[in-house]
Amino acid sequence: MRLGAMFTARLRRNPMTRAVLSKFARGAQILAVSSTVFCKELVDVLRDRRTLIFMLVIPTVAIPVLMWVTSELMTHFMEKLAREQVDVLVLNPEAAPELVEEVKKRANPLGRARRVAELLKAKGVGESELAMTKGEPRAFLRLLEKKGIDPEELATELRVAVEDSDFKLEPGAIIQNAFPPNFRLVTELDPRDYDHPAEREQVLLEAVRTDEIAAAIEFADDALEKLASGDSTEIRVYYLDASDRSSTALSGLRRIFKSLGKQMVAERLLSKELPAGFANPVKVRPERLPGPGMLVKFLSQILPYMILIFAFMGAMYPAIDLGAGEKERGTLETLLVAPVSRLSIVLGKFGVILVAALVSAVLATISLSVSLYLGIFSTISLVSGGSFSFSIQEALVALLMIVPISGIFAALLLALSIFAKSFKEGQSYASPLQMVIIMPAFVSFVPGVKLDWLMASIPVVNVSLALKEIFTGNLDQHWAHVGVIFLSTSIFAGLLLWFATWWFQREQVLFRS
Amino acid sequence: MTAGSQALVSVVSLTKIFNDRQRGREEIRAVDAVSFEAHAGEIFGLLGVNGAGKTTTLRLLATMLKPTSGEASVCGHSISKEPQAVRRRIGFMSTATSLYGRLSAKEMVTYFGRLNGMSREAIEQRILELFDLFGMNEFRDRRCDKLSTGMKQKVSIVRTVLHDPEVMIFDEPTVGLDVLTSRTIVDFVKDCRTRGKCVLFSTHIMEEMEKLCDRVGVIHDGKLLACEPVEALKSRTPSGRVEDAFVKLVGEPA
């Protein structure tokens, strides 16, 4: 006992230990003061409606609402496009009247389409949902699955309802028939009026531009002969790339001629007494593995971007409020004359901004995931399909990735904000910075960019990609990257915090006139 | 109560030079070799027109700015070497020291008590005492931005004296205030002297200075032109008026 006391007494007298002890005491004091500053600033910021809106309301409410509106609008316009009838000009109907008849039959089966749509509606499939799956057989199958409809049963019912012998029963065909390319074939323009091909193209271009027609088709003069002899013929489709109607017409015409071609092949095979698979010897049948689905892919692209943006936005208002806001409201001098170190003030303010960034980012993540999980957005959930889930480990590592990058945002914004004389000036500095942050964060959307050592060394980009890998479920292959990114980002954040503290001691910054 | 002989504030050729970027890095000597002393139990006035250097001098003393050269000490602590110790011993108030609008009066005062290193109990004790004294209990839990100007001034006063500092610094505290509100402040400044504090008080209003100050320093273009008792200043001109003495000292405007 006594020996121990003697030892501690000697230790206390040792100059080295005394120096260390006083360093510790000073550090503890700085932390104590900065926690006082932190608590006050937190209360202060939480009583500000502007900050609350940016930190809490926008991430939780605005994301789902905004995405829901976008999704509904998209559905609406796709539906409209599907219902709209457009005119397609046939330049030389006399060259292949039989083909024109076939196209007409396929191009405008509105009655049949209505019956299919009605049948599906009776089974609880809305028109908009149906429109979304147009040309997406896989999505259509998922839609049936979701509504609890057996595709086989549906096919039988449809056959009875439609009473059409050449009606295709594969899911993709059902959709195409529900919303067929809605064309009307017209023949007003006679190509023989124009000798020069360039002149004719000019007339066609004008017609497409003024929405008079959506596209034009032209048969080869020997089309019927070629077909009769078992050969193939080319059908020219004139269209305009820049026009939505025109490109939709092109793809519609493609589908029509493809189905026509299939029918012809079937007839040819039948006449030669060959099996139906003769012209189509190899077929691909995709078997989805029970791994991460399309929804995971979608989430892993959008979440890193959202997280980074919302971390920045959540930090922006408190940062401007706690720096420039103090100057604008004249409280900076009150604070500076208090007997505390500038470091404790900066630490306290930094802490509040960091917390705001994290709260905002986490809320955005939760709200986006929950709304996707509940299937609020018909567009996304139908097209993507599958489900997603994060383990606790993945969520924690993701959070560990977000903390230091939020620290960088917080320190940068605080430094800018201290420099600004007013709230407005602060905002005008933060907005360009926001652009600088958002651009590299967008990398999570770029396909094929993998997290490697080069990418891991670029700030913001590295965190975005690391989050993408974590959400895709590839954390196991990237532990080294994630560790290095965490360390380097933390060091960077620390340096920026050190800079902010130094900056906060400069008279030129605090008392700009 | 008599003025103590001990100098609580001593300023020795204090100089502050600003570089003005807008005017091609021209040097502005905002405070130019100013020296004076202020004692316990006296009110020392700094008199000067706007831009004469009063605010800069007081900001230097409050360690918000660092001097270019020269030295000053507050209660024996150097403003350049021990700024935190200096700030602990001063109560600083100016029109630029506003309140946090989103905090209540009590929260505001408590926060600054904590920043001054006071314990929660001590703060609670002082708040009971001071809020009673200034009749502030009625609005103690009201947010500062909902207070009237007079109430705000009272909160500021309590914020300034909560930690019972030995030196009080007032930088034009009455600018832009109505008669009643500035009266609260003037009474408070006098009260500080009665309690034996060393008070520094800057103003450009002659009557205010005459009413309050024991000694006065006339500052112009950063230079201290005179530093003497108010009576001595008055006797510089036959009229015996401070204004005439001031104009005579700084020279007629060109």
Image (tube, rainbow, N blue to C red):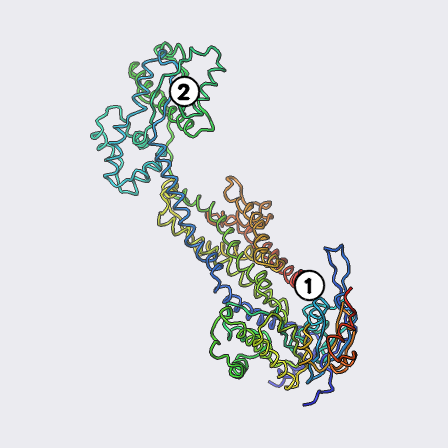
Amino acid at pointer 1: Glu
| B180 sits left or right of A17 in the view | left
Quarter holding the N terminus of chain B is bottom right
Q: In the current view of this chain or complex, which residue is farthest to the front? A: B239
Q: In the current view of this chain or complex, which residue is farthest to the left? A: A160
| A467 sits left or right of A370 in the view | right
Quarter holding the C terminus of chain B is bottom right
Q: Which residue is mark 2?
A: A216
Q: In the current view of this chain or complex, which residue is farthest to the bottom? A: B1
> Of helix, strand and loop, which one carries label 2?
strand
- Can residue A278 be seen? no
- In percent of width and height, residue B245 lies at 76, 76
Neighbourhood count class around disc 1 (C-alpha, 10 Å): few under 14, some 14–19, many 20 upward:
few
Instruction: State the separation of the CA atoms marked 1 and 2.
Output: 73 Å
Whichever of callouts 1 and 2 sits on the residue coming sooner in the sequence is 2
Quarter residue A134 falls in: top left
- In percent of width and height, residue A208 lies at 43, 24
Q: Chain of mark 1?
A: A
Amino acid at pointer 2: Ala
Q: State if disc 2 and disc 1 touch (CB < 8 Å).
A: no
Q: Nearer the viewer, residue A245 or A190?
A: A190
- Checking the image for residue B236, the label placed there is none
Quarter residue B200 falls in: bottom right
Q: Which residue is mark 1?
A: A507
Q: Nearer the viewer, residue B106 or A454?
A: B106
- In percent of width and height, residue A245 lies at 41, 28
